Image (cartoon, rainbow, N blue to C red):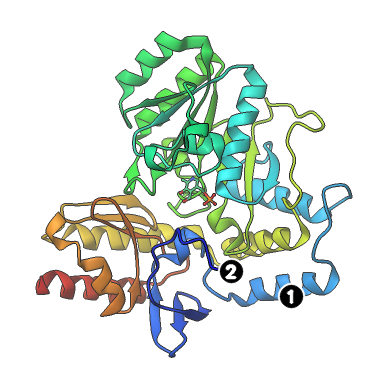
Amino acid sequence: MKLFDVYPINPIEIVKGDGSYVYDVNGIEYLDLYGGHAVISIGHSHPHYIQRITDQLHKLGFYSNSIEIPLQKQLAELLGKVSGKKDYQLFLCNSGAEANENALKLASFYNGRKKVLAFSGSFHGRTSLAVSATDNPKIVAPVNETDNIIFLPFNDEEALEKAFSQYGEEISSVIIEGIQGVGGIRVASNSFLQKIRTLTSQYNAIFIADSVQCGYGRSGEFYSHDHAAIEADIYSMAKGMGNGFPIGAIAISPKIKPWFGELGTTFGGNHLACVAALAVLETMEKEQLMQNAARVGAYLLQELKGFDKVNEVRGKGLMIGIDLPEELNQVKKDLLFKNHIFTGEAKPNVIRLLPALNVREKEADRFLEALKERLNRL
Ligand SMILES: Cc1ncc(COP(=O)(O)O)c(C=O)c1O
C-alpha cells in the first residue's frame, strides 16, 4: 500500500530530538523554532515527560471512559489552576478539530440555535463543522457546506455589531482564535474580543476561544484571549497540551450543564494522554515557561522590529509572524536548508515562529543572526 499523498514534505528525516534541537538521520542538528506545527511546548524529549509516560506505560496504557480514571481529575484540577479557570469543566478529546467540533456542538445544545459567527483568515480544523468555520473554501467539501456559518471581517467591530443586530437570537456561538495562526499570525484586538464578550452575553450566544495554537502559555498568558481580560464560555485546546502526545480538550464555563451522552469519545482522556498532559503542566509550572515565553518572545519581537526589508512583525510571546515581501519567498527554505533552522509559514509570505516555551535567548540570537544573513544576501 502507498501513502495517500496529501502532504508536501521536506526531504529531511528527523530521528531524534532534545530541547529545541532535532537531529536528522545523518546526524545533522537543526534548531527547531516550529515544534512540528506548534506542538512541542516543553521541548523534545523532556526527561520529566519521558519518565511520566514510561511509568504509566508500565502500569496501564489504555482503558475507556467507562471506568474511574483519577488521572483525568488530576489533569482537570491542575489545568484549572494553571489556566486560572478553576470553576470550569474539562472534556477531553484527541485533537484540535475535535475540540472545536465539540465546542460548536455544545454551544448549539446549550442555546438550541444554529448560526455561528467566524472570521476571515480563520482556521479551526478539518472535521465537519470546524472546517465549515474555516476560511478556506478549498478544504471545505460539498458535504460540509452550510448556511449556518457567517464569516465576518476579522477585528471589525462594526460588522460584528451589525451581524448581531441582523441575526440576533439565531446566533449560537462566535468562534475566534486570539491570535490567528494559519491565517498569518494576526492578533485579535483587545477591544474586538471585549466586544464579542459583550454581544455574546447580551444575546445568550456562546463565546468560543479557539486556543488550539495560540493557547497553552504560548502568548505569555495561558490563553491568548486573557490579554483582553475577558472570559470566554468555552476554550478549545490541543497542540502544546501533550507535547506531541495526541490530546485535545475543551474547558467549559460552569453555566453550561452536562447531561449523560451529550459528548463522547473512545480515546479521549486515556491514561497515557493524561500523564503526557500532566507532565506538560507540571513542567510549565516548575520551569515557569509562560514567563519564559513572555520574556524571550518580547526580546524576539523587539529585535525583529529593527530589521529592514521586513514588511511587518506580528504576534505575542512565542507566536511570531515575520511578514516578508513576496520577492523574499526563498528565505524560509534557505533558513532550513542552509542555516538548519525549522520555521513555519503562512500565505502569502509569512515566516511563523512557534518554538518550545523553554527556548532560550541564545537560540533566539542564533535565529536573528541567520535571518540577518539571509536578508542581507538577497
Ligand atoms: C487555531 C487552530 N484550531 C484548530 C486546529 C486543528 O487542530 P488539529 O490539527 O489538531 O485537528 C488548528 C491546527 O492547526 C489550529 O491552528
Disc number for residue 54: 1
Q: Position of residue 149 (x, y in %)?
A: 46, 25
The answer to whether residue 235 is visible is no
Q: Is residue 148 visible?
A: yes
From the top left corner, tell me how far across and down residue 309 is, in percent. Answer: 11, 60
Q: Residue furthest right?
A: 67
Picture disc at residue 154: none
Looking at the picture, which amino acid does disc 2 mark? Met
Q: Quadrant of residue 284?
A: bottom right
For residue 295, what is the image quadrant? bottom left
Residue shown at 72%/53% (left/top)?
Answer: 75
Residue at 50% x, 40% y: name it.
210
User: In the rendering, at what x and y percent does residue 109 appear?
Assistant: 67, 23
In the shown orientation, is residue 103 left or right of residue 185?
right
Residues under labels 2 and 1: Cα distance?
32 Å
Kindly give the residue lying farthest to the front in the view shown: 1
The quarter of the rendered structure image containing the N terminus is bottom right
Indicate left or right for 222 with 275 as reference. Answer: left
2 or 1: tag closer to the N-terminus: 2
Label number found at residue 1: 2
What is the three-letter code of the residue carrying label 1? Thr
Verify CB contact (< 8 Å) between mark 2 and mark 1. Answer: no
